[in-house]
């Protein structure tokens, strides 16, 4: 069953009150929702709280969801709005950056050395990502983590296509500057 | 459209945003310019690394906590269904009662104009008179129905 059809079946069950179907949807999307929140808020506890609020809102409004659009786009739109809202509040009350855990299911089972190398690269990139402005970090997360198209990001964020392209270019340039030397050495 | 030989061109190439002429020019730059080739390789590394970063994950009890929270706040689906069914049943009883009342009133009017076996016949002959009365009854019935429905809805929604 395709992801969209699977989501559709789960949503229909959840709309009828099947809490287990909703739990499966949560399990499927919690990583992305939490990651988007964390990349913006940079605080693990607060990011988890935001993710909880997002799923509660999704559950409350599940009957308003129509099958015309993708569930993931609808979910990320709710997440994006919540994250932007919280980021505004956070600017008023600065909270420190805290460490996060990683989903072991998303790590490939390669050789130990390849895993270590990947882990190191992952850490480098993540540290660099956390140094980017919140909006640029969110766009990169949407573009790379879920491989959403620019048109889908337009739908989620409400930004224009050209604005997104510019922000993506700008954020990756910054990322390259932050990672200066690391990848150059690897290529040589 | 002309394209500048810079980092933006590399990202546009990696995003698949270049047309065929631009892609051809881009390949030419790669062949001719070693520094540009290096920049291209560096961007590819970042591009690939961004795609393969593992997602962060919330605590292991995340889903369970959420489900508990939903269960605490939500009204059970069965309860809602039972309430709706009761409401429908009450509405049907009300409508049925009103219809019965109308039929009884119509027949009693018809009966009042005749006697014995001729009662039915006199009912037929008195149709214009009944028709006039029927408008009054219909109006009263509709008012009663609307009032009754609203009353039932208020009663059930508040309980």
Image (cartoon, rainbow, N blue to C red):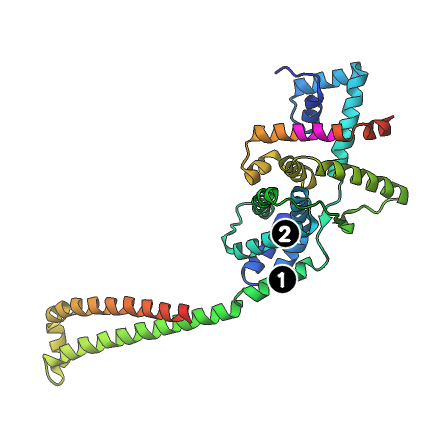
Q: Above or below — where is A115 with respect to B101? A: above
Q: Above or below — where is B122 with respect to A113? A: below
- Asked where in the image residue A132 lies, by quadrant, the reply is top right
Residue depth check, mark 1 versus mark 2: number of the one nearer the observer: 2
Element carrying mark 1: helix
Q: Say whether residue A29 is visible.
A: no
Main SS of the magenta part reads helix
Q: Position of residue B137 (x, y in %)?
A: 19, 70
Q: Say whether residue A79 is visible.
A: yes
> Which disc is residue A27 wearing?
none
Magenta stretch: give its range: A170-176
**In front: A160, or B113?**
A160
Horizontal relation, residue A119 to residue B84: left or right: right
Residue that numbered label 1 is attached to: B67
Which residue is pictured at 10% across the width and 73% down the height? B125
Horizontal relation, residue A48 to residue B113: left or right: right
Q: Chain of mark 1?
A: B
Q: Residues within 10 Å of mark 1 (few under 14, many from 20)?
A: some
Is residue B128 one of those drawn in magenta? no
Q: Position of residue A120 (x, y in %)?
A: 83, 40
Q: Residues within 10 Å of mark 2 (few under 14, many from 20)?
A: many
Residue that numbered label 2 is attached to: A51
Q: Above or below — where is B33 with respect to B92? A: above
Element carrying mark 2: helix
The answer for how far apart the CA atoms under marks 1 and 2 are is: 13 Å
Contact (CB < 8 A) between labels 1 and 2?
no
Which residue is pictured at 67% across the width and 49% down the height? A34
**In front: A171, or B141?**
A171
Which residue is pictured at 14% across the width and 77% down the height? B109
Which residue is pictured at 71% across the width and 24% down the height? B10
Horizontal relation, residue B26 to residue B94: left or right: right
Identify the residue at the far bottom of this view. Answer: B116
């Amino acid at each position: 069953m395709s992801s969209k059809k699977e989501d559709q079946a789960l949503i229909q069950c959840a709309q009828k009150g099947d809490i287990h179907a909703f739990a499966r949807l949560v399990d499927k999307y919690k990583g992305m929702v939490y990651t988007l929140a964390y990349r913006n808020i940079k605080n693990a506890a607060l990011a988890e709280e935001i993710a909880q609020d997002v799923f509660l809102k999704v559950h409350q409004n599940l009957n308003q969801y129509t099958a015309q659009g993708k569930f993931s786009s609808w979910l990320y739109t709710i997440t994006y709005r919540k994250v932007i809202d919280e980021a505004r509040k956070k600017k008023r009350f600065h909270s420190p950056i805290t460490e996060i855990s990683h989903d072991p299911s998303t790590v490939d089972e390669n050789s130990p050395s390849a895993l270590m190398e990947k882990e190191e690269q992952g850490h480098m990139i993540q540290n660099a990502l956390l140094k980017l402005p919140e909006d640029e970090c969110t766009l990169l997360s949407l573009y790379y983590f879920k491989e959403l198209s620019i048109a889908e990001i337009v739908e989620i964020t409400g930004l224009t296509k050209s604005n997104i392209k510019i922000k993506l270019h700008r954020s990756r340039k910054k990322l390259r500057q932050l990672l200066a030397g690391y990848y150059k050495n690897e290529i040589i | 459209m002309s394209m500048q030989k810079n980092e933006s061109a590399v990202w546009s190439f990696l995003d698949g945003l270049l047309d065929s002429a631009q892609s051809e020019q881009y390949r030419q730059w790669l062949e001719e310019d070693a520094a540009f080739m290096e920049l291209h390789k560096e961007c590819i590394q970042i591009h690939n690394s961004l795609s393969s970063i593992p997602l962060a994950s919330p605590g292991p009890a995340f889903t369970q906590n959420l489900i508990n929270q939903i269960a605490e706040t939500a009204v059970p689906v069965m309860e809602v269904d039972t309430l709706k069914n009761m409401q429908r049943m009450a509405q049907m009883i009300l409508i049925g009662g009103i219809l019965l009342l109308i039929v009884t009133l119509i027949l009693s009017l018809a009966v009042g104009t005749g006697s014995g076996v001729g009662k039915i016949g006199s009912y037929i002959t008195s149709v214009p008179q009944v028709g006039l009365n029927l408008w009054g009854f219909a109006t009263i019935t509709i008012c009663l129905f609307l009032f009754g429905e609203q009353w039932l809805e208020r009663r059930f929604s508040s309980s």
